[in-house]
Amino acid sequence: MINSIWTGLVDIVFPRNCVLCRAWHPATARDPLCPACRASLAWNTPPFCVRCSRHLDTVSEESLCPSCRAHPPHFDEGWAITRYEGPAREILHKFKFQDKTSLRRTFTTLLNQFITRYDLRFPGDPWVIPVPLHGTRLRERGYNQAALLAAGVAEELSLTLREDILERARSTPRQSELGAKERWTNVKGAFRIKNPAAIAGRAVILVDDVLTTAATASEAAKTLKDAGASRVTLITLAIAPCGSCAITS
């Protein structure tokens, strides 16, 4: 009660502006993006890659994007809400590196709209598990953006959030600093399961912020499935276009 009153007073004295255009709008008291900036986000749309949901400019017989054809990921299916371009890329950068953690509300809203639009179903009463950060990176950043997103997914779908299952076994160089092929090598063996008995036979929704080559999410999914997870579905806020994820020989 006191916190709610205090928050209301702060919003009156220091009204929140949109994190993108910096304009004030009544809606930004509840969502850090104003309606115009939210409308400018590029939705991920069909035709989807049947494995990762990346938009396909041309549809092949197997309906796979170039990345999933070249290096099939270990998760069973993936769903990305927006395309990693323009405003979506900018808000993810703010969310991940500039402490704009209130943007998780935007993600939850977009997730609900995406699930409704495509009538997504998640059978098996899955646990929601974020892709973890190594302790060193977590201390540097102060929070795990994937964990914040996973909390929104769990709340929206009324599912159990488990942050005590999957952990980083070792610190790795930032994926963004590596080429596509090097990213797969970089994360090999990067995860471990804290309690293998707990995950055996369990369906999982794995949550991360963005999918590019799928290397990190695939390695996390492999770790979960090697421990006995029955199915791993990936959910990300954004997905990079095929041109930025291709793996060349």
Image: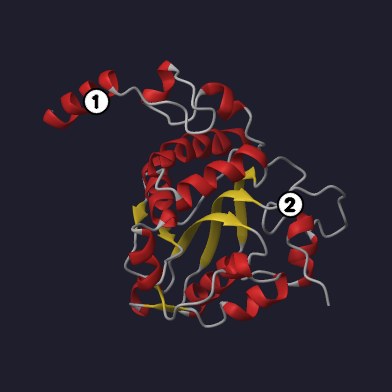
Mark sitting earlier along the chain (1/2): 1
Hey, what amino acid is under mark 1? Val
Residue 65, picture quadrant:
bottom right
Residue 169 percent across, percent down from the top left = 42, 80
Using residue 64 as the reference point, say whether residue 111 is left or right of it: left
Residue 156 percent across, percent down from the top left = 41, 40
Name the residue rendered at 61%, 33% in the picture. 117
Residue 168, picture quadrant:
bottom left
Q: Nearer the viewer, residue 127 or 34?
A: 34
Residue 125 visible somewhere in the drawing: no
Residue 78, picture quadrant:
bottom right
Residue at which label 2 appears = 241
Hey, what amino acid is under mark 2? Pro
Residue at which label 1 appears = 10
Name the residue rendered at 31%, 68% in the picture. 164
Q: Nearer the viewer, residue 46 or 147?
A: 147
